[in-house]
Each structure stands twice: as C-alpha cells, then as structure tokens.
Image (cartoon, helix red, strand yellow):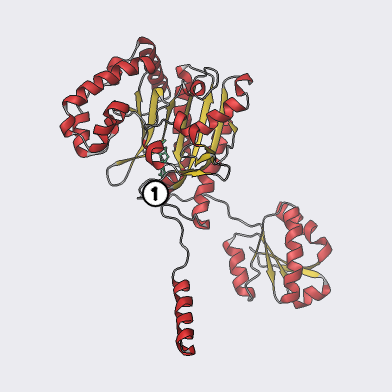
Amino acid sequence: MPRIKKELQEVKKKKRKKMTSVQVIKGMKDILPPEQLFWDYVIENSRKLCKDFGFGRIETPIVEQTELFQRGVGDNTDIVEKEMFTFETQGKDRISLRPEGTAGLVRAYIENGMSKWSQPVKLYYEGPMFRYEKPQAGRYRQFHQFGFEIFGDEGSAIDAQVIYLAWKIFQKLGIKDINIQINSIGCAECRSSYKKLLQDYYEMKINKLCIDCKRRLDSNPLRLLDCKEEKCMQVATSAPQIIDHLCVICHDHFRSVLEFLDEVEITYVLNSRLVRGLDYYSKTVFEVWENNSEGGQSSLGGGGRYDGLVEMLGGEETPAVGFSFGIERVVESLLKKEIQLNYNVKKEVFLIQLGDKARKKILRLFDKLVDSNITVGESLGRGSIKSQLRMANKFNSKLALIIGQKEALDNTVIIRDMESGMQEVIVMDSVIEEVKKRLKG
Ligand code: AMP
C-alpha cells in the first residue's frame, strides 16, 4: 500500500477514535456540582431528622449474593425477574448489584446479631441502587435511595412513626403538596384467601388482560392490581378489595395506624390497589405521592411492614417496617419548584494574589486559615485584582487578604475590610490572630 494512503488511513482511524468518545452507560448519569448542592440539602436534612428520631446509620455493600434478592424480594417480582444486574465472579459466585436496600439490611441485621441489641433497632441508609429498567424521566438504571427501617416492634404506632418521619422529611425539604397512599395487604393467612378470590375474579376477565398480567395471574395475582396498562386498570377498578378480607388482627392493626395518622394530621388516601412490587410486604403498605404541575401524581417513595422477612432470610421471627425514597426524584422535584437553597456559601476570608511568588505564599496561608476553622476562598487561576475582588464579593467575604510582589518579598499581607474598603499592612506571622480578632468583631 502506498505510504500516503497508509498515512491517510491512520489519520482517519485517529479521527474515528476521537469522535467515538466513551459515554456514560445508558440509564446512568453524572451528578455535577450545581446539582450536588441539592443532593447535600436532601441528604443532610434527612440524616438530621433520622438522627433526631433515634436512627443509627448503616452501610451495607452494593453487591450481595443473588440469592438474597431471589429469596427476599421474590422470584416472581419484576425486579428479580428482569431488572437485576447479575454477574458471576471469578470464584463462580452469583452476585447482584443491589436493586433495593431492605434485603441487604435484613441480612446485616441477622449476620451482626442485632436481635440481641436493645429493640427496636432503628437504622437508616443511603446509596446507589441498580435496576435494569427502561430509562425514562425519573427512572434510571443507577439511582439513589435514602431509607430507614425499624426492626423488632410489631405495634401499629411504629408503622405510623415511619410514615410520620417520611412525611416530616418531605415537609422539611419544602415538598409539601404530597399525600400518603396507603393500604393493608394483610398477613400471609388473610392474603392467601384473598389471592384466591382475586384469581377467580381475574380468570373471568382473562381476555381483557395484558400478556404480563395473564402470565402473573397464577404466580403473583396481587401485582395485577397495580398494572399500568389502561385495559388492566379498567378491570382492576371492580376487583375485590383486600381491605374487606383482612383477618381481625390485620384489620385492627390497619385501623389503628390510620388513627395515629389522623392524630398527627397527615393527609392519606386509602388506595385498595396499592400492593407495592415486592414480595416481602405484609400488613401496612404505603407510598408518598406528589401532585405535579401537570395535574398528575408521581411516587417519591414507598415502604411498609415486612414482618416475615427476617425469618425468611434465616433470622429469628422479627417484625419490621421501613420506607425509602428516590433521591433523584426528590432533587428533580426541588429543581422544578425552583426552591432557593439557603446554602451559606459565604467564605469569611478571600485570598488575593498577584504574581507567582504571592501565589506560593497564598497556598501556605490558605492551609493555616483552614486549620484555624476559618472558611476561606481563593482564585489562584485569576490574575487581575479586580476580578479577584469581584469573587470575594460573590462569596460575601468579610475580609480579603492581598499579597502582591512587594508583600511576598517583605513577608507581609494587606488586610482589607470588604465593607469599608479600609486596608492595612500586617506581618505574615500575625495574620491568623488579626483575622480571628476582626471576624469576631
Ligand atoms: P420502590 O420501592 O420501587 O417503590 O422505590 C422507592 C422509590 O425509589 C420510588 O418511589 C422512586 O422515588 C425511587 N425509584 C425506584 N426506582 C427508580 C428508578 N429506576 N430510577 C429512579 N428512582 C427510582
């Protein structure tokens, strides 16, 4: 091949390489600094409330044995059937990226002997979850949840406390136009007779169902109630309601949860079609729905009681209840509302430098100020004093410390009061003391 042709091919190859830069995986996204402000706001407020309510933070691994989710979440759920990221390790173990947080927390509760701790055990968590879903607005393949769980108390007051905390978090964040959609799906006993009734009802309407519902009718009939296909929603409107078929214990438990919610004036809507997608729930299930500007409603989070799960995963019989919300959805809601965050981005002191020598001095001074717990800003990349002073104003700094060529040689600093514009030269060694004095003043 002539040399010139070969060279041209090389150039083309390089160009192709450049054009096809590697992109983020479908359904996943980067969270950039401007958005992080909202993430911090959501997480810090949620953490604070959880701590106030006596919850301790737990972190579990992002990957677990696949079996944990098969047994915990349920083989016949959408999540386990088709949404998990599952791998085989080099040691031939089958592991999955966690699609939700509760199963991992239950494993940790059992494995760390928490049933011996003083009960109830109250835990909160946050972190990434992974579901291989069709990406769309508000639905990602990697998303983040904040959640909390209470183990070891079967009382209805605990269900109400979890709902109350969920409610309070959203109120605190400024998401006020919400309601609690609530239902009871009973215990294993009342649910099993209800499932039969439901199957009988749906058998009669089988021709009106979507393929997924026809398939699920035997294995997981409850899921037919929350199918989003229009024709299945029509059929569901006249389906028997579980609330009419609860046993006395489940019925009383549910009534009592609602009474607690009335007491704390939480707006709830009885939703007989709310079953939640996961197998582990029993008795109370609920979701937090937000009324959106388009007149519809979207789910920010959900939870419920799961009294059988700890035992099912090999632990002692332990009642439990929990809730989680999607951080992306909450951040998107805040962004839509254009909520102004009162984040204090104030830097008490701003460092201004002119020239290379000054820049070196600034680096050391920055360190000393940070060590003295003084919030400090700088703009090492900028050259002109004017633009650096503009930055100091933007950060609402009370003082600017200016080092030019002369000050760098003399080992001095100009201290400027940003409000009055008054300036004074001081020796470097006394800067920290002087700054502290002026900040206090
Ligand atoms: P779930 O337990 O599946 O109802 O999930 C609880 C909350 O997590 C939902 O209300 C959403 O806010 C959030 N969530 C669930 N799946 C996704 C997803 N694929 N992308 C973003 N957020 C999600």
Describe residue 123's horizontal placement relative to residue 169 as left or right: right
Residue appearing at x 56%, y 27% in the figure: 122
Residue appearing at x 46%, y 20% in the figure: 308
Q: Residues within 10 Å of mark 1 (few under 14, many from 20)?
A: few
Residue appearing at x 71%, y 77% in the figure: 355
The answer to which of 271 and 280 lies nearer the viewer is 280
Q: What amino acid is at disc 1?
A: Lys
Q: Position of residue 411 (x, y in %)?
A: 82, 70
The answer to which of 20 and 3 lies nearer the viewer is 3
Q: Position of residue 238 (x, y in %)?
A: 19, 25
Describe residue 152's horizontal placement relative to residue 132 as left or right: right
Residue appearing at x 57%, y 52% in the figure: 344
Vertical arrangement, residue 75 with respect to residue 120, above or below: below
Vertical arrangement, residue 349 with respect to residue 325, above or below: below
The answer to which of 174 and 203 lies nearer the viewer is 203
Q: Position of residue 311 (x, y in %)?
A: 51, 20
Evaluate whether residue 170 shows in this view: yes
Identify the residue under disc 1.
Answer: 337
Tell me the quadrant of ligand 1.
Answer: top left
Evaluate whether residue 53 shows in this view: no
Vertical arrangement, residue 366 with respect to residue 63, above or below: below
Which structural element holds mark 1?
Answer: helix
Which picture quadrant has residue 92? top right
Which picture quadrant has residue 209? top left
Q: How many numbered discs sit on the rendered protein? A: 1
